[in-house]
Image (spheres, helix red, strand yellow):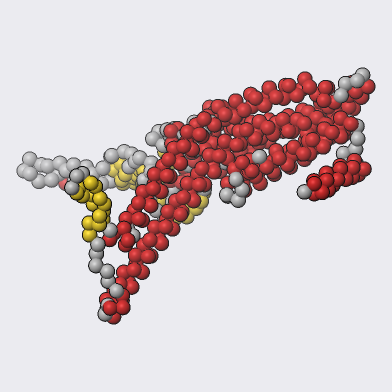
Amino acid sequence: MFMLIMQFFWKYLDDLMGKGLSTLVILELLFYISASLIPLALPLAILLSSIMTFGNLAENNELTALKASGLSLYRIMKPLTIVVFIIAFFTFYFANYVIPVANLKWHSLIYDIQNTKISSIITPGVYSNELDGYSIKVDKGTDDAFSGILIHDHTSPEVLKTIRAEKGRIYKSENGKYLFFELNGGYVTEELATQSPSFLPDGQIHPSKNSSRPSRRTSFEQATYKIDLSGFSLNRSQEDLFKDKHEMLNVFQIYHELDSVKKNAKGIQDNFLVSIKSDHAYFESIHYKEIEQDDKNIQTNLDSVPKLIEFNKLSNEERLAAIYHTQSKLRRINQNLTGQADYLKGINMDLDGYWIEFHRKFALTYAIIVLFFLGAPLGAIVKKGGFGAPVVIASLLFMVYFVLISVGDSLASSGVVSPFVGMWFASVVLTPVAFILMRSAANDSPVVDKEAWLKIFKRFKRKNARSLSHK
C-alpha cells in the first residue's frame, strides 16, 4: 500500500507542491486514496500471504506430515479457502459501495487542489488581477521562479504602491493564508493620495498647501513582500459534478445509468431518422389525406402529386442549378450522417465505460480467489517461507497480473475487445495456471511433466478421432 501511495504522490507531485495545504487536507486525501487503492493492494496481499503460509508449512515439513496422515492438499486448504471466499465477498461489497465514494471524494479534492495552483494565476507578459487589490505582471518565468516582476498594490485607497524587481520566487505560507514574493534587486515606489488645496480669506490658494501628490522611492537588494490570500483559499466544489463518472457508481447505479443512456440514444436516433426521412424528396412530394366517402368508407388517397420534371428537357442553366442543388443537399446529408455516426460512437464508448466498471468489480473478487489458488500451491512447491523468496515470487506474479489487467483495461477502453473480455482477461489467463499448479502440488508431481502432458495430448487426440469416425 505504501508503494502505491508513493506512486500516486509522484503522479500528482506538481499539483501538491507549493500550495500551502493544511495537514488535515493531506490526511483526508491520503485516506480516500488508500481506500481506492485496495483493488491493487488486496490481491497482492492475498498472493503473498498464501505463498508465505504454505511455504512455511512445506519448509518445516508440516505439509508433508499432514499429507502423510491422509489429508490431501485440498482438505488442508479448505479452512483457508473458506476464509478467502469470505474476504472475496466483503471485497465485492467494499468495491461496490465504498470505493465509488472514495473515488468521488479524492477526485473532487484533487480537482480543487489543482485549481488553487498559485503559479497558474501568473502568466508572463500579462497583467493578472486574480488577487483582489493587486495587479501583478512578470516578463518571463515558470512554476515559482520569475523575472521582471511588477506588482501594483491597490489595497490602500490612500497609497498607490508599486514594486519592481529583477527576479523573484513565489511561495505560500504553511497555513496557506499568505503569499510571499522573495524579490531580488528592485525598488518600491509609494504615491500618496492628492492633498486637498487650502484657500486664503481672499479666495486665493494657500501657497504652502498647494495641491500635490507626494511620493517616495526605496531601493532594496533583497526583500520579501507578503500578500493576503484570504480570498484565494481552497474552495471545495460540489461533489455532484463528479457523480456521473463511471468509477463513482456501484453496479445498481451503473444499470440505471445504462438504461438512461440507451433510452436517450434511441430517442435521438429516432428523431434523426425522422428528420432524414422528411428531408427526402420522395417523402416531400407525397402527402396522404384521409377522406370520407359514402357510408363512412375511409380511403387513403394522394393529396397532391407534384408534376414530374424530366432532366433531359431542362435547359443547360436549369441542369446546372439542379446539379448544384443536389450536390449541396448530398453534402449536407453526408455531414449529418457523419455527425450522427460520431455521436453513436461516443455513446458506445460511454456504454463501454459503464460496462468496464461493472465487470471490474466482479473481476476483482474473482482475482482474489484465483491468486489464492495460485499462491498456495506455489508456496507448497517452492517450500520457502519468510520474506525472502515468497516476496520475490509474489512480486513477479503480481507484475504479470498487473500487466494483464492493464492490457485488458486498455483494449476494452479503446474498443478493441468487449468490456467483458478486457476486464476478465487476467483471470482467464491465470485460471489455467492456477489449475496446473494445484494439480502438481496435490499430486507431488513436477509442474512440467512431459509424460503426463503427452498422455493428456494422446487422450485428447483419441477423443477427436472417435468423434470424427462417428460423423
465 left or right, relative to 423: right
Residue most toward the front?
A: 295
Residue 416 visible within the image? yes
Residue 138 visible within the image? no
131 left or right, relative to 113: left
Residue at horizontal 65%, vertical 25%?
89
Where on the picture, by quarter, is residue 435?
Answer: top right
On the image, the x and y values in percent for residue 210 come to 18, 46
Residue at horizontal 52%, vertical 30%?
252
Above-or-below relation of 293 to 81: below
50 left or right, relative to 368: right
On the image, the x and y values in percent for residue 74 come to 82, 25
On the image, the x and y values in percent for residue 458 come to 88, 45
Where on the picture, by quarter, is residue 34?
Answer: top right
Above-or-below relation of 2 to 262: above
The N terminus - image quarter: top right
Residue at horizontal 29%, vertical 74%?
310
Residue at horizontal 7%, vertical 44%?
203
Residue most toward the bottom?
A: 316
On the image, the x and y values in percent for residue 56 come to 86, 26
Residue toward you, 177 or 397: 397
Counting every numbered tag in the picture gives 0
Residue most toward the left?
A: 202
Residue toward you, 8 or 289: 289
